[in-house]
Image (tube, rainbow, N blue to C red):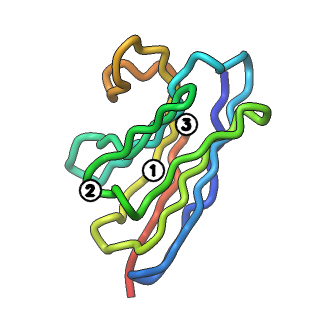
Amino acid sequence: VQLQACGGGLVQPGGSLRLSCAASGRTFSNYFMAWFRQVPGKEREFVASTRWNTVYTADSVKGRFTISRDSAKNTVYLQMNSLKTEDTAVYYCALSRSAGQITAGNVEYWGQGTLVTVSS
């Protein structure tokens, strides 16, 4: 299984970015596809996930970030609007077959991470 994430970069506060992550190697229809983020010295933090027709979004990004999924392409997206400096982090895509909610502890596959820097 491989996860290839892209779309990170430098953006000014209030700006937008769209991350994408393409998965390959098997069928992922029963997997959570999700995004986490991490800053140095802190634990990896859940951002958003989607499985079947259900979406979960962290309170810290609710109303600004939107996760979506193209099952035909095995690709998950994260549209990030109204970015804030505190959104600066390395963003990781992730896959899990957890029976409950996805957490960093039950992720089976991680992408390589893409850096998002929000700065003026």
Q: Position of residue 103 (x, y in %)?
A: 33, 27
Identified at 74% across, 20% down, the residue is 25
Q: Which mark is in front, 3 or 2? A: 2
Amino acid beneath label 1: Tyr
**Side of 38 where 27 appears, left or right:** right
Q: Which residue is mark 2?
A: 60
Q: Amino acid at mark 2?
A: Ser
Say above or below: 17 vs 74: below
Which label sits on residue 111? Answer: 3
CA gap between label 1 and label 3 equals 9 Å
Q: Amino acid at mark 3?
A: Gly
Disc 3/disc 2 C-alpha distance (Å): 22 Å
Residue placed most toward the observer, 83 or 117: 83
Residue at the far bottom: name it: 120
Dot 1 or dot 3: first in sequence order is 1
In three-dimensional space, the C-alpha distance between marks 2 and 1, rounded to whole angstroms, equals 15 Å
